Amino acid sequence: MTIDIDEARVERSEIGLWLGWTLVTAGGMLLGFLPTVLLVDVLSLGLARIIVPVLAGTIIGFAQWIVLRRYVTPGSNWVLAGGASWAAGYILALLLVQTLPSTVFVEAIAYLLFGVIVAMVQWPVLRREIPNLLVWILASSLGWAAGFWTSQAVLSMFFNVPSIEPAVSTTIIAVTSGLVAGAITGLALVWIVRKPELT
């Protein structure tokens, strides 16, 4: 099922869509990842690597849907696409990071790959609005990669100690990466909606 975004509604509130998308992506990241700090201690590492991204992706997808629903015609699989895309992207990017030597280049490729996978799983829901998949892939991959790198920079600016409380580091990483990724993908979403759609 695809969504149909009401361009007139977006045109009246482009900043509202962008700002809402940005904030709920950050909020969804926080709500999706902060509770998992407790799960990681309870679950095995392998199980946590599956449950955490599915939970986080579903919460982020739901949060984004709360904003999108004001601009779309009824019916969408957005929340399902969010959970599935996050699980697939997270698992494949994690495998890449674990199998290759740990370098800045490998981490950059992993986060770009994560964004590509998220975009490709979301695209069937957005294909009516985004006839060219490449634009959404670029926004998603650059947004999530930039979000990760920014969150690491923010974390290192404020915490220069070897041991940081997991809840604090998770909060900083989730909110910062969510704001950056949400801002970039939200900007792309508004720009894309201005273009003619496929009927």
Image (cartoon, rainbow, N blue to C red):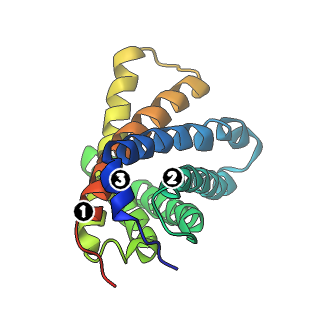
Residue type (three-letter) at the residue carrying disc 1 = Arg
Q: Position of residue 19 (x, y in %)?
A: 38, 40
- Between residues 185 and 11, which one lies in front from this camera angle? 11
| Residue 107 visible in the picture | no
Residue type (three-letter) at the residue carrying disc 3 = Tyr
Image position of 109 with respect to 174: above or below = below
Return the disc, 3 or 2, that comes first in the chain's sequence.
2
Q: Which residue is mark 3?
A: 111
54 sits to left or right of 128: right
Tell me the CA gap for discs 3 and 2.
Answer: 20 Å
Q: Which residue is mark 2?
A: 64
Q: Secondary structure at mark 3?
A: helix
Q: Secondary structure at mark 2?
A: helix
Residue drawn at 71 percent across, 50 percent down: 44
Residue type (three-letter) at the residue carrying disc 2 = Gln
- Between residues 178 and 71, which one lies in front from this camera angle? 71
63 sits to left or right of 157: right
Task: From the image, state whether disc 3 or disc 1 is nearer to you.
Answer: 1
Return the disc, 3 or 1, that comes first in the chain's sequence.
3
Contact flag, marks 3 and 1 (Cβ < 8 Å):
no
Image position of 65 with respect to 184: above or below = below
